[in-house]
Image: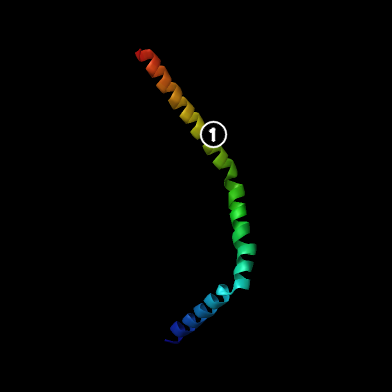
């Protein structure tokens, strides 16, 4: 019973501290933004590669459709 109350009190204190505007700004500035920046920097080459492959596949599909249409008539 003591552990449960103690854990609930700690959680309530943490939630109230995180809910303060000053702490929200610090969390956003020092944790969330750098994390997203790091993840985006690491994924950027793969996003570009995926976009290039998508465009190439689209161009190939259009080319195949054009070839099929010309050969039919």
Quadrant into which the N terminus falls: bottom left
In the picture shown, does residue 43 fall above or below 73? below
Quick one: which residue is furthest to the bottom in this view?
A: 2
Q: Residue at x 57, y 46 (%)?
A: 43
Q: How many marks?
A: 1
In the picture shown, does residue 19 fall above or below 34? below
Return the residue nearer the eye: 18 or 72.
Answer: 72
Expressed as whole percent of the image width and height from the top left, the position of residue 36 reads 59, 55
Q: Is residue 24 left or right of residue 56?
A: right
Q: Residue at x 47, y 81 (%)?
A: 8
Q: Secondary structure at mark 1?
A: helix
Visual colour scheme: rainbow
Quick one: which residue is furthest to the left in this view?
A: 72
Q: Residue at x 54, y 34 (%)?
A: 52
In the picture shown, does residue 73 fall above or below 57? above
Q: Residue at x 42, y 17 (%)?
A: 67
Q: Is residue 41 left or right of residue 11?
A: right
Residue labelled with disc 1? 52
* Rendered image quadrant of residue 17: bottom right
Expressed as whole percent of the image width and height from the top left, the position of residue 51 reads 53, 37
In the picture shown, does residue 21 fall above or below 59? below
Return the residue nearer the eye: 25 or 52.
Answer: 25
């Amino acid at each position: 019973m003591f552990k449960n109350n103690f854990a609930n009190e700690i959680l309530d204190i943490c939630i109230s501290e995180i809910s303060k505007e000053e702490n929200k700004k610090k969390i956003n500035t020092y944790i969330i933004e750098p994390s997203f920046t790091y993840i985006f920097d690491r994924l950027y080459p793969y996003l570009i590669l995926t976009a290039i492959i998508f465009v190439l596949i689209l161009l190939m599909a259009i080319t195949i459709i054009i070839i099929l249409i010309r050969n039919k008539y």
